[in-house]
């Protein structure tokens, strides 16, 4: 393949090259890379600039392509990953996020699953509200049976995603939302307690104003049937809120989305209401709507120790035109999505490199100056983007749904119903070698294992530069920082340097929310951000942040408490229980069989099965669940012997180090009776009964550590450190993202 003549210089970090080669560059059928990074940027620039040919006025495509190429190769702006991957290629699907409707009929549900598969195949992520689906055990008039409820259908969507993602360059990702007033809300809140289910979903509760008011008053609120629209029950808002907090404290999910708030900012209320967002929660979209995102690298917007406002305005103008052109040349996977997207023309221009900009300016992340500057920069970006959108409307016309929109009659028309969004920027921030979104630094220094024994100490480039210039750099100090996890109490580092190199765990949760709120105030859509908690944070700490997010104008919030997930992110903090020369990485688990103490404590649960009542006893030792016994109400027979076998095998697994949740995963949902199940737990088999009894036991004893043993963890692709940001896990070494 002939190489294009380079039009500009291109300097990429080794990590950026690795990410591009693994996930972005064109390959031949045998997998050989066919283009260099510069080729990719030129392919994208020329494809997007070619949209100008479709309009009578505007820019000369060849000249505009040079401008687009310049802001990308200088790493001042990058579009979302599907645009980089697919622009100028056969697939041509350029949007990152979509929302699909999920109706209440079998036909509507499986039509959405088909459409989901098409979107995931094309590299997009999908958001859904499952709130229209009637609750479990509700009547189904057409069959005289009962509904299986939204959770059962979520598992079908999850399975479809699991299948489709196997052959793609981007993993399929989903957001599942259920309104807080849905009858199945408690089951939804609990659905990811077992972290092996719905692994392709982020989940969030759709919170209403009425619910939050009831929480503050410790009052009941209405539970509404989606089938009839009638109030079918009343429930304690405080208890539901506490359960959301409990599960978020336990493993980071569910998040919350303030539905009434995002609909107050809906620019096209006559077209429809927001029900769902994209997988990371920053982009509310109408059913069948898509949005293409892009981010400005704020670290490149500094000159002479100040924000370069002039250059920032220039990049915003080019980026806004770029994103509107993307809408024009995009090849949409579904006709309904093409129609809705062209009718509203939403774009989401955001930022990355915020933490790096603050470092360059010498401003601590958790300071009033940072909060004020964040609000000022985002207001500037949104104002400049809307100015460009008005210019585009004069050239090309306003978005077709302009009449009746919130912009109608309020001045000059705009081309785009929304202009700004703060996205996580996981992989494009790696390409840009800058900090992600508006997140603080993950770490100043961390240790990365390569091959079996070799280790590399990765150091933030700005910190290394300052350390060398000011004479306190040493390899030993960098490794100490990596093991320690923070520089705030290392006296060898000057105080003014410690002040600006603040990491996510050095910042209070309240300061995380204050920063999110500052950017949200001037962002059309929403802000993707993770509020980080230390491992010893309390449930009340989480509840306080949720209330603060609501009070400060955020549109949603995602939290993560360090160490709270089974596959924990690679900790940069040294574990004192390990040998002095240990390096944090995921190691093979050694199995050993625990000896049985003379006496154990436990609980017995009665479960209704098709074979009669089954009594299940779960016993524990100091390390957690230890053994399981079963007694069948009807003595003898195959059912009794099979249940005894299940008990013996589960006990052996637990005593050998297998977690309770893994046993649940293997047995839950096994069916040998009617699909609707027996009893209040809807038991479908004896094995299912055992699994559900274990789940109940885990729920009753979660404070004792049965649900989230800390196994350590690392990126599943490269073994590097992964970071929780924007409701997602991202590896800043190879670009792996659980949401992309």
Image: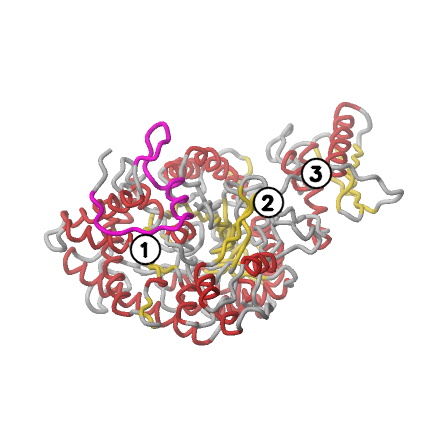
Residue 640 visible in the displayed image: yes
Q: CA distance from mark 2 to mark 3?
A: 21 Å
Q: Position of residue 687 (x, y in %)?
A: 69, 32
Q: Position of residue 553 (x, y in %)?
A: 44, 68
Q: Are marks 2 and 1 in contact (CB under 8 Å)?
A: no
Magenta-tinted stretch: 5-34
Earlier along the polypeptide chain: callout 3 or callout 1?
1
Q: For the residue labelled by badge 2, is the local secondary structure a helix, a strand or a loop? A: loop
Q: Please tell me whether mark 2 or mark 1 is closer to you in this view.
A: 1
Number of numbered discs: 3
State the residue lying farthest toward the bottom: 368
Q: Position of residue 182 (x, y in %)?
A: 52, 52
Q: For the residue labelled by badge 1, is the local secondary structure a helix, a strand or a loop? A: loop
Earlier along the polypeptide chain: callout 2 or callout 1?
1
Residue at the image position 42 percent from the left and 55 percent from the top: 424
Q: Is residue 30 left or right of residue 648?
A: left
Q: Where does label 3 land, which residue?
A: 590
Q: Which mark, residue 75?
A: 1
On whether residue 14 falls in the magenta region, the answer is yes
Quadrant holding the C terminus? top left
Q: CA distance from mark 2 to mark 1?
A: 37 Å
Q: Nearer the viewer, residue 560 or 248?
A: 560
Q: Please tell me whether mark 2 or mark 3 is closer to you in this view.
A: 3
Residue at the image position 36 percent from the left and 47 percent from the top: 81
Q: Which mark, residue 195?
A: 2
Q: CA distance from mark 3 to mark 1?
A: 45 Å
Few, some or many C-alpha atoms within 10 Å of disc 3 (few <14, some 14-19, many ≥20)?
Answer: few
């Amino acid at each position: 393949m002939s190489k294009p003549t380079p039009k500009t210089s291109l300097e990429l970090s080794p990590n950026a090259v690795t990410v591009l080669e693994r996930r972005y560059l064109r390959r031949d059928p045998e997998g050989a890379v066919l283009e260099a990074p510069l080729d990719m940027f030129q392919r994208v620039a020329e494809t997007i600039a070619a949209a100008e040919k479709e309009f009578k006025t505007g820019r000369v495509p060849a000249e505009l392509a040079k401008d687009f190429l310049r802001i990308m190769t200088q790493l001042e702006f990058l579009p979302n990953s599907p645009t980089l991957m697919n622009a100028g290629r056969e697939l041509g699907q350029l949007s990152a996020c979509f929302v699909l409707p999920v109706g209440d009929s079998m036909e509507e549900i499986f039509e959405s699953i088909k459409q989901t598969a098409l979107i995931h195949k094309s590299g997009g992520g999908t958001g859904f509200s499952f709130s229209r689906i009637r609750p479990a055990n509700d009547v189904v008039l057409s069959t005289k049976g009962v509904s299986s409820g939204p959770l059962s259908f979520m598992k079908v969507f999850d399975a479809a995603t699991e299948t489709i993602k196997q052959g793609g360059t981007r993993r399929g990702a989903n957001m599942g939302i259920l309104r807080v007033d849905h009858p199945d809300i408690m089951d939804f809140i609990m659905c990811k307690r077992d972290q092996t289910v719905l692994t392709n979903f982020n989940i969030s509760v759709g919170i209403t104003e009425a619910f939050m008011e009831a929480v503050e008053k410790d009052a009941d609120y209405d539970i509404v049937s989606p089938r009839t629209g009638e109030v079918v029950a009343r429930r304690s808002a405080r208890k539901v809120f506490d359960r959301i907090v409990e599960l978020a404290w336990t493993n980071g999910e569910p998040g919350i989305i303030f539905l009434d708030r995002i609909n107050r900012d809906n620019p096209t209320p006559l077209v429809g209401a927001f029900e769902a967002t994209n997988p990371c929660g920053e982009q509310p979209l109408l059913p069948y709507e898509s949005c293409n995102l892009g981010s400005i690298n704020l670290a490149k917007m500094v000159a002479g120790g100040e924000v370069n406002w002039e250059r920032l305005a220039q990049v915003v103008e080019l980026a806004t035109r770029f994103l509107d052109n993307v809408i024009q040349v995009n090849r949409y996977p579904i006709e309904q999505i093409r129609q809705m997207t062209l009718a509203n023309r939403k774009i989401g221009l955001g930022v990355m490199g915020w933490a790096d900009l603050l470092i360059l300016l010498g401003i601590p992340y958790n300071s009033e100056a940072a909060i004020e500057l964040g609000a000022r920069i985002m207001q500037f970006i949104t104002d400049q983007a809307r100015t460009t959108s008005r210019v585009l409307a004069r050239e090309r016309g306003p978005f077709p749904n302009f009449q009746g929109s919130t912009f109608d009659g309020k001045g000059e028309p705009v081309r785009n119903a929304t202009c700004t969004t703060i996205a996580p920027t996981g992989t494009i921030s790696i390409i840009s070698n800058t900090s992600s979104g508006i997140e603080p630094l993950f770490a100043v220094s961390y240790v990365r294992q390569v091959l079996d024994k070799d280790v590399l100490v990765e150091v933030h480039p700005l910190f290394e530069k300052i350390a060398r210039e000011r004479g306190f750099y040493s390899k030993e100090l960098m490794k100490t920082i990596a093991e320690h996890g923070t520089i705030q109490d290392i006296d060898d580092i000057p105080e003014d340097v410690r002040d600006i190199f603040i990491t996510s765990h050095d910042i209070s949760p309240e300061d995380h929310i204050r920063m999110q709120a500052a950017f949200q105030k001037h962002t059309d859509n929403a802000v993707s951000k993770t509020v980080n908690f230390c491992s010893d944070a309390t449930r009340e700490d989480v509840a306080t942040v949720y209330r603060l997010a609501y009070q400060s104008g955020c549109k949603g919030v995602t939290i993560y408490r360090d160490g709270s997930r089974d596959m924990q992110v690679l900790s940069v903090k040294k574990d004192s229980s390990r040998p002095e020369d240990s390096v944090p990485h995921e190691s093979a688990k050694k199995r050993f069989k625990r000896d049985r103490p003379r006496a154990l404590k436990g609980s017995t649960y009665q479960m209704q099965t098709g074979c009669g009542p089954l009594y299940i006893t779960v016993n524990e030792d100091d390390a957690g669940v230890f053994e399981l016994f079963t007694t069948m109400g009807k003595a003898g027979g195959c059912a009794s012997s099979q249940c005894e076998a299940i008990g013996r095998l589960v006990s052996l697994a637990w005593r050998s180090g297998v977690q309770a949740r893994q046993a649940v995963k293997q047995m839950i949902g096994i069916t040998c009776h009617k699909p609707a199940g027996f009893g209040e737990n809807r038991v479908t088999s004896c094995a299912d009964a055992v699994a559900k009894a274990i789940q109940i036991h885990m729920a009753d004893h979660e404070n004792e550590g049965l649900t989230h043993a800390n196994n350590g963890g690392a990126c599943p692709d490269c073994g590097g450190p992964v970071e929780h940001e924007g409701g997602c896990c991202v590896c800043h070494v190879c670009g792996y993202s659980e949401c992309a």
